[in-house]
Image (cartoon, rainbow, N blue to C red):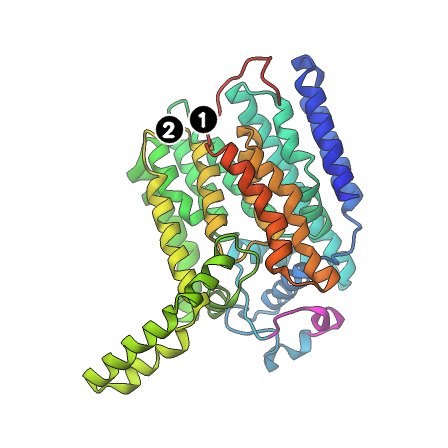
């Protein structure tokens, strides 16, 4: 059924691309998007039970407890446990979700004592936010005078509908904030002071929904034309909303540390890289260096603390983290990335490729910009990434065959269409 949806999407976009511009109206696009999401709202979250964790964290906040310090298995939270708690994964890990996401979870968890009603409420809220993303993309399409049917690549995309309305992933909250931040920049028109402040506020909302947009703030600061003001406002807003969490946790929340160190799945560069690091004997070389330093300094306790971190997966993550940092710096090159829409898509896509964990719903961050920029590789990946569910559904390993079926076609498309060009007006003869 999912791939029938992708086939229908491709046919529909192709038909509209050859029809007069007035054929597809914004009302048609939104009504179809609403219908698709409404059809999947009753779908039980069978592919991912993340939504159970969202609601649990919301209940913890509503009970006046700190989900950043108390894992679901904590004795202090025993009175909150129910059947949904039993089905939830990672009882030992405190929450990794920022404050705005927790506020949304708490709102949904306060709707009813029934888990099923809470799930439906949260999926409904996320679907409404996703429809707002579709509306904002139409604004961008009109502003750039690009064909409206490109928005359908996001609004009618089966992966987007499945992951938001079907599985209820919170990424929809961050995505709408990121798209809003780009809309409010007003580029190519000069950004007013109010627009810059509004874009900075949207950027902070995105960071406080999920942390990924933090990497976009330097790019957006440059694109705003008022970099000092943009950075100052974002820093102030994040300090007001984020510092209380850091203070309460005594630093980075432990759940976030656990995620960064331990989580790994389907990373396109990570999966082969850690195996290469292991094959080259890097951990053995690092251990030899540590042994030499320990003997030379005669300070065994200090060096001994480093040995547990000497394994190939962590070395690969550190290398990829350095790659993410370089990508952020590269996004600031004015000549290459004049258009913040294309630059945002490029940077989010590059960060995704460097991530050790790539679940299907992570692609939602890239798709709005890939849709307007008409990026075949990323749009094609939306049809390939659902295959990452096969190991869970069929009990088969991800590596190497499922991994290769997902990423080799993407690599071929990326090789053929590597560039994120500025999103500019196109002639009617240009297809989809």
Return the residue nearer the eye: 93 or 383. Answer: 383
Q: Quadrant of residue 284?
A: bottom left
Q: Is residue 403 left or right of residue 332?
A: right
Secondary element under disc 2, as helix, strand or loop, is: loop
Q: Quadrant of residue 429?
A: top right
* 207 within the magenta span: no
Measured from the top left, where is residue 220 in percent x and y?
Answer: 39, 38
Secondary element under disc 1, as helix, strand or loop, is: loop
Position of 114 relative to 25 (above/below): below
Crowd tier of the residue under label 2, counting other residues whose Cα lies within 10 Å: few below 14, some 14–19, many 20 or above: some
Do labels 1 and 2 touch, CB within 8 Å? Answer: yes
Name the residue beneath numbered marker 2: 338
Return the residue nearer the eye: 262 or 340. Answer: 262
Q: Is residue 129 visible?
A: no
Position of 304 relative to 133 (above/below): below
Measured from the top left, where is residue 325 in percent x and y?
Answer: 35, 50
* Marks 1 and 2, the one that precedes in the sequence: 2
Return the residue nearer the eye: 378 or 281. Answer: 281
- Quadrant (top left, top right, bottom left, bottom right) of the N terminus: top right
Return the residue nearer the eye: 127 or 8. Answer: 8
Position of 362 relative to 397 (above/below): above
Crowd tier of the residue under label 1, counting other residues whose Cα lies within 10 Å: few below 14, some 14–19, many 20 or above: some
Q: Residue at x 40, y 37 (%)?
A: 197
Q: CA distance from mark 1 to mark 2?
A: 7 Å
- Quadrant (top left, top right, bottom left, bottom right) of the C terminus: top right
Q: Quadrant of residue 244?
A: bottom left
What is the span of residues highlighted in magenta in the rendered image? 81-91
Q: Is residue 179 visible?
A: yes
Name the residue beneath numbered marker 1: 422
Measured from the top left, where is residue 395 in percent x and y?
Answer: 72, 64
């Amino acid at each position: 059924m999912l791939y029938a949806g992708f086939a229908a999407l491709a046919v529909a976009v192709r038909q509209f691309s050859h029809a007069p511009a007035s054929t597809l109206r914004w009302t048609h696009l939104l009504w179809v998007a609403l219908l698709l999401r409404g059809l999947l709202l009753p779908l039980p979250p069978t592919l991912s039970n993340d939504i159970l964790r969202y609601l649990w964290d919301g209940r913890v906040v509503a009970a006046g407890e700190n989900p950043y310090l108390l894992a679901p298995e904590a004795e202090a939270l025993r009175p909150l446990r129910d059947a949904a708690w039993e089905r939830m994964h990672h009882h030992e890990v405190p929450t990794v979700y920022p404050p705005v996401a927790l506020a949304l979870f708490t709102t949904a968890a306060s709707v009813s004592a029934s888990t099923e009603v809470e799930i439906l409420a949260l999926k409904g809220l996320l679907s409404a936010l996703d429809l707002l993303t579709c509306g904002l993309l139409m604004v961008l399409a009109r502003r750039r005078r690009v064909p409206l049917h490109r928005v359908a690549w996001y609004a009618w995309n089966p992966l987007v509908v499945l992951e938001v309305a079907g599985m209820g992933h919170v990424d929809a909250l961050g995505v709408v904030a990121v798209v809003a931040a780009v809309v409010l920049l007003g580029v190519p028109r000069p950004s007013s002071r109010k627009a810059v402040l509004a874009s900075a506020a949207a950027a902070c909302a995105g960071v406080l929904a999920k942390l990924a947009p933090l990497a976009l703030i330097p790019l957006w600061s440059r694109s705003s034309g008022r970099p000092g003001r943009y950075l100052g406002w974002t820093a102030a807003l994040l300090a007001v909303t984020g510092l209380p969490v850091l203070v309460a946790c005594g630093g980075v929340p432990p759940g976030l540390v656990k995620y960064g160190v331990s989580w790994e799945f389907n990373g396109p560069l990570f999966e082969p890289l850690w195996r290469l690091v292991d094959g080259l004997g890097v951990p053995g070389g690092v251990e030899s260096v540590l042994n030499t330093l320990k003997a030379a300094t005669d300070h065994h306790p200090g060096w001994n603390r480093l040995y547990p971190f000497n394994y190939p997966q962590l070395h690969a993550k550190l290398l990829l983290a350095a790659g993410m940092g370089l990508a952020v710096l590269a996004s600031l090159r004015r000549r290459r990335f004049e258009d913040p829409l294309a630059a945002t898509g490029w940077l989010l896509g590059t960060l995704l490729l460097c991530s050790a964990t790539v679940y299907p719903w992570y692609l939602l961050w890239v798709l709005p910009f890939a849709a307007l920029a008409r990026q075949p590789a990323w749009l094609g990946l939306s049809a390939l990434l659902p295959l990452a569910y096969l190991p869970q559904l069929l009990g088969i390993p991800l590596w190497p065959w499922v991994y290769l079926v997902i990423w080799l076609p993407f690599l071929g498309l990326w090789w053929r269409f590597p560039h994120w060009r500025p999103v500019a007006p196109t002639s009617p003869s240009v297809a989809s």
